[in-house]
Image (cartoon, rainbow, N blue to C red):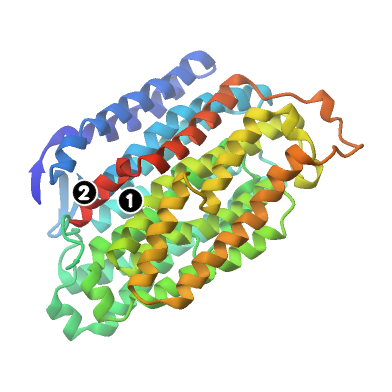
Amino acid sequence: MKVIESSLILWPLLVTLIAPFLVLLAGKKINARESVSFVAGTITFALVLSCAPTILSGGILRYELFQILPGITLTIAMDGLGFIFAFIAPFLWVLATSYNIGYMRSLKEHAQTRYYFCFGVAIFGAVGVALSANVFTLYLFYEVISVFTYPLVAHHQDEEGFAGAKKYLVYLMGASKLFLLPAMVLTYVLTGTLDFPLGDIHSGIFSKEVVASHPDLVRLTYVLFIAGLAKAALMPLHNWLPSAMVAPTPVSALLHAVAVVKAGVFSVSRIILSGFGTETMTTLGLSLPTAYLAGFTIVVASLIALTKDDIKARLAYSTVSQLSYVVLGVALVAPMAVQGGLLHIGHHAFSKITLFFGAGAIYVASHLKSIKKMNGLGRRMPWTFGAFGLASLSMIGVPPVCGFVSKWYLVNGALQQEQLILLIALLGSTILNAGYFVPIFYRAFFLEPDPSVPISEYKEAPVCMVAPLVMTSVVSVLLGFFPDIFQNFIRAFGGY
C-alpha cells in the first residue's frame, strides 16, 4: 500500500473541533446552535467521503502534526478501517442532531447549549480515534471522548445521574490510567515507536526479534491494552455501560452507536490488527483467550438482557453482547472472522442507534420505560415500532438486514478456525437475541393494552425524531443488500 502525505485528512478534524465552539457562541439562539451541528456534520461527512477513492485504490492518507519525542508523534492517518469509523460518526451526527431537536425541545431539557457542545466534542474525539496513526494519538482522542461525555451522562444533575456518571468516569478513566497508559509506555520501551504499521495487519509494531526475546512482556502489554480499552465493554469491565443509561436517550444512542463504545471496539480492532498483528497474536497464543472472553461476554450479557424490563437497560446489555462480536471476530484472526467483526462495527452502529432512537421516541410520546406496559403501543406508533422491528432483526441476524451478513462471516470464521465452542456461542446468542427482542415487537402489535395505560392518548413522537430512526432502519436493510459498501474498505485495509 502507498502512504500519501496529505493535509486533506486534517480537515474533518478541524471542522469537528471548531463546531462545538460555534455552538457555544450561538448560546441560546437555538436555531443557530442546531444549524451548526447540521452543517458541521454534513461538511465532515463530505470531507471523509472525498477520501474514499484514494483508500479504495490502496492508498493510505497520512499527516504528521508534530513530534513530541523520537518515535512519539501526533499523527493522523486514514486507511480502510479508519475510513469506516470516520464515515459513520459524522453521518449519524447529522441524524442525531435532528433527533436531538425533537427530544430536547419536547421534554424542555435544561443546559442545551452545554449538551450540544459536549455532543460535538465527543464526535471530534470519535473522528480523532478513527484517524489515529499511532498509539499516542489514539490515547489522546480516546480520553477526549471520556472527559466530554461525562457531562452528557450526568446531564440531569440528579442523584441517579451523578452516580451513573461517576461510575462511568471511574471505569473508563481508571482503566485508561491503570492499564492503557502503562501499555503505551511498555510498547515504546520494547519497540522505540508507537506508530501503527498501517497497511500491514500481519506484522504489527512488535518485531519477531522482540517477540522472541521478550514474549512475556509482549503478552503483558497486550493484556494491559485490552483491559485499558474498557469502552469495548468486555466483561468484567462492562458495568459502566448499563449505569450510563441514566443519560438522556440521545446520549445513550451516542454512547452505544456513534462515539464511546464504537471507539472502544475500533481501538481494540486497531490494537489487535495494526498493533500486534495476526502473526504475533498467533505466535504468543493471544488469539483464542481473547475470543473466548468475547464469546463469554456475548452469551452472559444476552442472558442478563432477558431479565430486564426497562427498555434502555435491555438495550444496554444487548450492546455489551453485540460489541463482543467485533472483538471475537478480530481476535480469531481468520480472514472471514476479521471481516465479520469489522463489518459489525458499521452494521451495529446503524441498527443500535435505531433501537435507542426508538426507545427515546417511545418515552417522549408516552413516558413509558417498562416493556410490560407497551402492549398495543405499536398500533399507535407504527413507524417507530416498525423501524424498531427492522433493527431488532439486524441484532438477531435475520436476512436480509445487515446483522445477518456480519454473523454469517463470523460463523464461517469460527468454522475456519475449527472453534466449535465459539460457533455454539454465536448460534446460541442468535436465539437469545430473539428471546429479548421479539417480545417487545409482539407486545406492541399483538397484545391487548394494559387497562392502566392510556394507549389511546398516545401518538408518534415529533417527525424530527421519527424520520431519523426510520432512515437508520432503512440503512440497516440497505447494508444487508449491499454489504460491499463497508466490505470494500475492509478488503482494502486487510489486503483480502
Residue 423 location, x and y as percent?
46, 71
Towards the viewer: 23 or 437: 437
Disc 1 element: helix
Q: Are marks 1 and 2 in contact (CB under 8 Å)?
A: yes
Residue 51 in picture, x, y percent from top left: 20, 35
Crowding at dot 2, Cα within 10 Å, few <14 / some 14-19 / many 20+, comes out as some
Q: Secondary structure at mark 2?
A: strand
- Give the residue pinned by disc 1: 140
Q: Is residue 438 left or right of residue 31?
A: right
Quadrant in which the C terminus is drawn? bottom left
Label tally: 2
Please tell me the numbered disc located at residue 74.
Answer: 2
Q: Residue at x 52, y 44 (%)?
A: 352
Residue at 39% x, 32% y is 91
Marks 1/2: CA distance?
A: 9 Å
Residue displayed at 19% across by 47% down: 75
